[in-house]
Amino acid sequence: EDKVVQSPLSLVVHEGDTVTLNCSYEVTNFRSLLWYKQEKKAPTFLFMLTSSGIEKKSGRLSSILDKKELFSILNITATQTGDSAVYLCAVEDNNAGNMLTFGGGTRLMVKP
Amino acid sequence: GAVVSQHPSRVICKSGTSVKIECRSLDFQATTMFWYRQFPKKSLMLMATSNEGSKATYEQGVEKDKFLINHASLTLSTLTVTSAHPEDSSFYICSASSWPSGYEQYFGPGTRLTVT
């Protein structure tokens, strides 16, 4: 059974801080790992990672995957109040029609 | 943590037929359930929000007569794709929350629908 665990569950920081969100996983037949940002209802896609050691970057956000140790991190530098959201990690399984398994999310609050 | 299941995990149907997808919250009561469709490049599109015992609220551009949503109990919501068309082939994901606002959503594993 596929499993995704995110940590921490929640995090409170001040603007300008740098945060690192963790995602560890177990999956039968790994295809990809996805990061989403959820502010209201629909999660917004951030990154898709398929290869180890290759950093994906978008503005102040970056993410990297370690397929040997089965984890990924999402970094946010110079945080802003607009970064406050739930960050979701999901892994895609090649079996069962590319089934997605989501982690429980990390709730980030950025204070002014 | 809270567990949400979907059934079936994958289904193949012929054009013109209808297919029902179930979403269940296994260990909590879901006041609100959400249905998403995953498009290429992994974006998730919210289709509708359903609250137990009331009609679903559909997002703009989603045909409510084509995608029928029922939230009959606090642990079960169903999505029925009617008169399925190959363009409906996609990955459908539900999430459930015990909060009306959708705070703390828990996602199901998704259902892969293929319409031939």
Image (cartoon, rainbow, N blue to C red):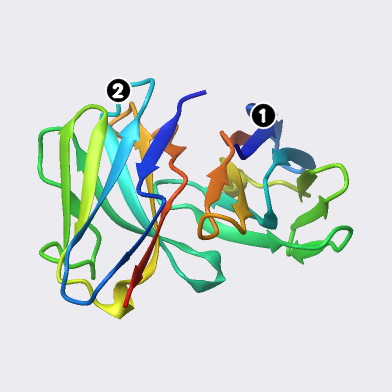
- Chain of the residue that carries numbered disc 2 in the rendered image: B
- Chain of the residue that carries numbered disc 1 in the rendered image: A
The answer to whether residue A36 of the structure is visible from this angle is yes
Q: Which mark is residue B29?
A: 2
The residue identified by callout 1 is: A11
Q: Nearer the viewer, residue A45 or A77?
A: A45
Question: Which residue is found at the position 75% from the left and 62% from the top?
Answer: A50
Which quarter of the figure has residue A3?
A: top right
| Residue A94, position as x, y percentages in the image | 62, 59
Q: Are marks 2 and 1 on the same chain?
A: no
What is the count of numbered marks? Answer: 2
Label 2: how many Cα within 10 Å (few below 14, some 14–19, many 20+): some
Q: Is residue A88 left or right of residue B18?
A: right
Question: Which residue is found at the position 48% from the left and 52% from the top?
Answer: A43
Q: Is residue B21 left or right of residue A17?
A: left
* C-alpha gap between disc 2 and disc 1: 26 Å
Amino acid under label 2?
Answer: Gln
Amino acid under label 1?
Answer: Leu
- Rendered view: A102 above or below B114: above
| Residue A74, position as x, y percentages in the image | 74, 48
- Rendered view: A58 above or below B94: below
Q: Secondary structure at mark 2?
A: loop
Quadrant in which the C terminus of chain A is drawn: top right
The answer to whether residue A111 of the structure is visible from this angle is no
| Residue B112, position as x, y percentages in the image | 41, 60
Q: Secondary structure at mark 1?
A: strand
